[in-house]
Image: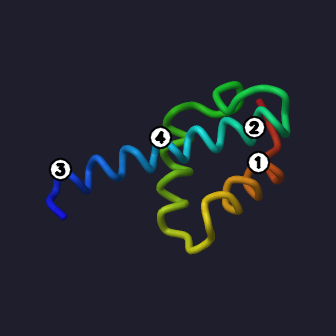
Amino acid sequence: MNTSMKTQSLILERTDFIELLSAEFSFAKGVGVYAFLSFSDIEKLYNQFLGDTVPVTIFVRVFVKRFRYTK
């Protein structure tokens, strides 16, 4: 797999991750992910996911369930 294909694959995976995260936030909290997290927070979370071994659906579900909004 060449570099551009790897990059496209990561972009697609990141997009899928964000869509799943937003859907889970909408279901659990009533609003999408951007009501709670900035783009840089989501990028950090995505990078954390990449270093984990659990499936994305479990990772996202556990994160949203444990998430507590503090301002």
Mark 2, residue position: 25
- Residue 20 in picture, x, y percent from top left: 63, 44
Disc on res. 4: 3
- At label 4, the amino acid type is Thr
Front position in the image: 30 or 16? 16
Looking at the image, do the residues carrying marks 1 and 4 touch, with CB atoms under 8 Å apart? no
In the rendered image, the quadrant that contains the N terminus is bottom left
Disc 4 element: helix
Residue type at mark 3: give it.
Ser
Please name the amino acid that badge 2 sits on: Phe
Q: Residue furthest bottom?
A: 53
What's the residue at 68%, 53% (across, down)?
60
Amino acid type, callout 1 = Val
Which of the two discs, 1 and 3, labels the residue nearer the N terminus? 3
Q: Earlier in the sequence, mark 3 or mark 2?
A: 3
Residue beneath label 4, please? 15
Question: Horizontal placement of 37 versus 49: left or right?
Answer: right
Residue visible at 67% across and 33% down?
Answer: 33
Residue at (51% x, 33% y) in the render = 39
Above or below residue 4? Residue 50 is below
